[in-house]
Image (cartoon, rainbow, N blue to C red):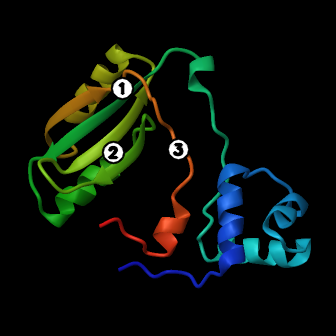
Amino acid sequence: MRSTASLDRFDFKILVHLQREGRCSNVDLADSVGLSPSPCLLRTKRMQEIGLIRGYGADIALEKLGDYVIVFSEITLSSHRPHDFRKFEEGAAKYEEIVECYNVSGGYDYLLKIVAPGINYFQALMEKMLKDDIGIDRFASRIVLRQPLNRREYPLGIIATQKRWE
């Protein structure tokens, strides 16, 4: 079980607002959550210090930079000892094209989200990963055709209150 931070309703309001508007000023943030600027800043800094807020980033429109593909690859390792998982994770971390990596349950070991400038580049990348011998036994890939939904905000109200759909 993960440890959770002790947060109140103002902290949650801050988090929800920052997910939507990470570049807002502290004055705007304080106004939107119903606090004065000084306590709002203290709360935000505390959540940064405890690692709850990991950072802020821009939402980049990749299509304006050039052609690209997003590929989800299901990776199965050849061995399943702890050092085999570490070897794969350390090897995968060296490829900047792998933007997300999940160790998952089920029929394969990892799910990778890969962003590449094209299919040929992606294929060459997979061949390089196999050649680098980071423990891949087999992989299956799914090319994203379109993305009809892209939520950048986590459902904080559901997670934080431990509500579960039954």
Q: What residue do we see at 79% from left, 67% from top?
A: 33
Whole-percent x and y of residue 124? 30, 21
Q: What residue do we see at 89% from left, 76% from top?
A: 38
* The one of 161 and 69 positioned closer to us in this rendering: 161
Q: What element carries label 1?
A: loop
Q: Using the numbered discs, state the Cα–Cα distance from disc 2 to disc 1 in whole angstroms.
A: 20 Å
Image marks 2 and 1: residues in contact by CB distance under 8 Å = no
> Callout 3 environment at 10 Å: few (<14), some (14 to 19), or many (20+)?
few
Whole-percent x and y of residue 45? 75, 73
Whether 68 is drawn above or below 150: the answer is above
Residue 32 falls in image quadrant: bottom right
Residue topped by disc 1: 144
Whole-percent x and y of residue 136? 17, 42
* Of callouts 2 and 3, the N-terminal one: 2
Residue topped by disc 3: 151
Residue 93 makes an appearance in the image:
no
Residue topped by disc 2: 92
